[in-house]
Amino acid sequence: MNYTIELIRLIAVILITFTHIKHGFNDGPMYYILEVIPKYGTLILSLVSGFLYNEVSNKNSSSGLVYRKIRSLLIPYLIANVLVITPVLILNYFGYNFLNRLDYDYTLLTQGILSLNSPPINPPTYFIRDLFIIFLIVGLLRNKNYSVLIILIPLAVFGKILLRFDILILFTIGVLFSMYRYYFEKYLVSILLFVSVLVLLFFNYLILFKYVLTILLFINVMRIKLGFVKTGGYTYLLHLYHAPIIVFLYPLLNKYIENPYLKVTLQIVIVASLSYILFKMVKRLKINILIGNR
């Protein structure tokens, strides 16, 4: 068990959770904490996913890759979105509208569940959706598993293969880091200078700086050996369910609490606590399918 990776993954999911915290801060330290820093969460998680894939693929047979990812990614993704859409429909029947991007029509299936062109009804799970598609592509290219075309072709025709292509790029860098870790760490300064020059000369986009910074931070932190605990199942549940918990929780907090700092703090504490309770229930009841058998 690589406990450094466990800590990095936990931090990444916490950052992703921060992006969905409801607040009224438009500047200052709290805005930076809740809006700017959390943007690195998905980037970090993409690197971690690529790194772990290559580490695990060196130990396990690649022939059952797609089947394993159906169990660990697709099924939990579908469950997480169906469990959100069900109470939304029930509450809409009684006059409460919790949708802000989708309409109460067929798009609840095509976009809300299948996420053909946009994030699903449970927005953070778009990462799980894209990660699953990446593994289908890996299965096609590496294992010549042509059955994945049943999903990839309709998706290409009626939607988008990937909602965010930077996830694929960072996933690939994570794989390369696992394969050539010695060279990444040995020539870190050279890599920094080379990538920085490329960004400045050919792209000239300051927005790309966050990708360079994420990669460099990941490489450096991975050099540190840390003692930690296994968090895979808990972080997965937190990733899957923090957004709907916040959506249903916030109106109640907003009604009775005026202090903006307390509202933010309670959202974080309650989401983290409920996710942990749910995780304990999943393990106790042995319904590991909710956490991809982690």
Image (cartoon, rainbow, N blue to C red):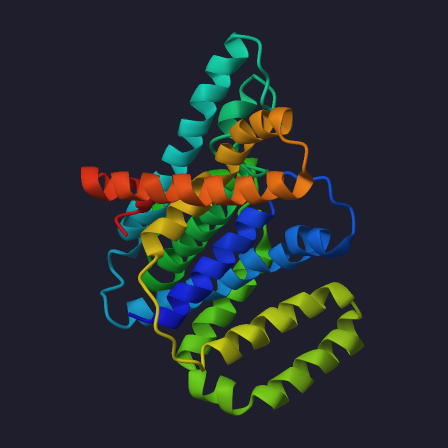
Count of residue discs: 0
* Residue drawn at point x = 64 percent, y = 59 percent: 37
Side of 73 relative to 253 (left or right): left
Side of 128 relative to 58 (left or right): right
Q: Is residue 150 visible?
A: no
Position of residue 207 relative to residue 162, above or below, is: below
* Residue drawn at point x = 61 percent, y = 85 percent: 191
Looking at the picture, how far across and down is residue 208, in whole percent?
70, 66
Position of residue 175 relative to residue 28, above or below, is: below
Looking at the picture, how far across and down is residue 268, in whole percent?
52, 45
Give 11 or 174, whichever is nearer the viewer: 11
* Residue drawn at point x = 61 percent, y = 20 percent: 103
Looking at the picture, how far across and down is residue 159, in whole percent?
56, 38
Position of residue 217 relative to residue 192, above or below, is: above
Position of residue 23 relative to residue 175, above or below, is: above
Residue 23 falls in which quadrant of the image? top right
* Residue drawn at point x = 58 percent, y = 77 percent: 216
Residue 1 falls in which quadrant of the image? bottom left
Looking at the picture, how far across and down is residue 244, in whole percent?
50, 33
Q: Can residue 86 be seen in this view?
A: yes
Give 273 or 183, whichever is nearer the viewer: 273
